[in-house]
Amino acid sequence: DIQMTQSPASLSASLEEIVTITCQASQDIGNWLAWYQQKPGKSPQLLIYGATSLADGVPSRFSGSRSGTQYSLKISRLQVEDPGIYYCLQGYSAPYTFGAGTKLELK
Amino acid sequence: EVQLVESGGGLVQPGRSLKLSCLASGFTFSNYGMNWIRQAPGKGLEWVASISSSSSYIYYADTVKGRFTISRDNAKNTLYLQMTSLRSEDTALYYCARRGHSLDYWGQGVMVTVSS
């Protein structure tokens, strides 16, 4: 099974700060990587798919990148509505696996 | 507008069964693979099962293999999850999700509590 190692587990940042979250895949998954944001009491919302493609309606301050088997989500200027828990998901092969999540808070 | 509405959850005793449903609307259901994902209280997301558009390909997490069955009725635009031999560790909020660009649309979730 493919393991997704997500870091950091938690993060506190200030408004307008740049935030980066990473996921390391245990093997090659190509671009089959997605990022989700989940707010309390809500369903996860797709942010990025195909490692780098922005989902519909997602602000352009969110971006995704890939370097080999390491994937990153970047928030270019943190906004007040961005705190939540962020998850990566590999959809390359079943069983599909999520990262453990990153809890992002405002400082 | 894409909508996914789960139902069928509740409180069930260990060892018993439960069947979840997910009614889809706003898109051509028969064209998309579908998935179940769960989230135990205060925990992260766990993928449970996947079914292709024509039911030709079905996959399960090891934690539910042999106990859960995913199925779909394209005529009724409905996805199902039959859960048997339920355990306390199956207690979770269960989401259905469409596989378009990754898992692009999710339902609001339905709670399953396994307890005596």
Image: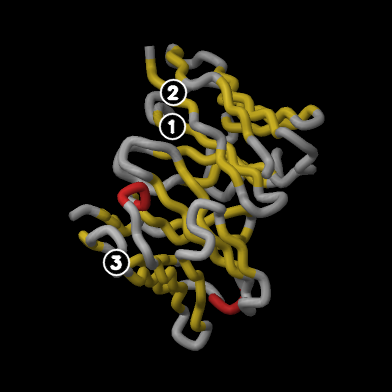
Binning the other alpha carbons within 10 Å of mark 2 as few (below 14), some (14 to 19) or many (20 upward) gives many
- Residue placed furthest toward the left: B116
Instruction: Judge from the rendering whether residue A103 lies leftward or rightward of residue A88; answer left or right.
Output: left
Spatial CA distance of label 2 from label 1 is: 6 Å
- Give the spatial CA distance, label 1 vs label 3: 33 Å
Amino acid type, residue under disc 3 in the picture: Arg
Contact between labelled residues 3 and 1, with CB atoms less than 8 Å apart: no
Quadrant in the picture for the C terminus of chain B: bottom left
Image position of B72 (left or right of A96): left
Residue A26 against residue B102 in the figure, above or below? above
Callout 2: chain: A
Disc 1 designates what residue? A85
**Residue located beneath label 2 in the image:** A104
Mark 2 touching mark 1, by CB under 8 A? yes
Do pointers 1 and 3 mark residues of a single chain?
Answer: no
Q: Nearer the viewer, residue A37 or A24?
A: A24
Looking at the picture, which amino acid does disc 1 mark?
Ile
Where residue A17 appears, as percent x and y from the top left, is 51, 14
Q: Nearer the viewer, mark 2 or mark 3?
A: 3
Res B16 label: 3
Question: Do the residues indicated by labels 2 and 3 lie within the same chain of the protein?
Answer: no
From mark 2 to mark 3, how far is it between C-alphas?
Answer: 38 Å
**Residue at x-position 59% and y-position 35%:** A60
Name which residue lies at 46% across and 43% down: B45
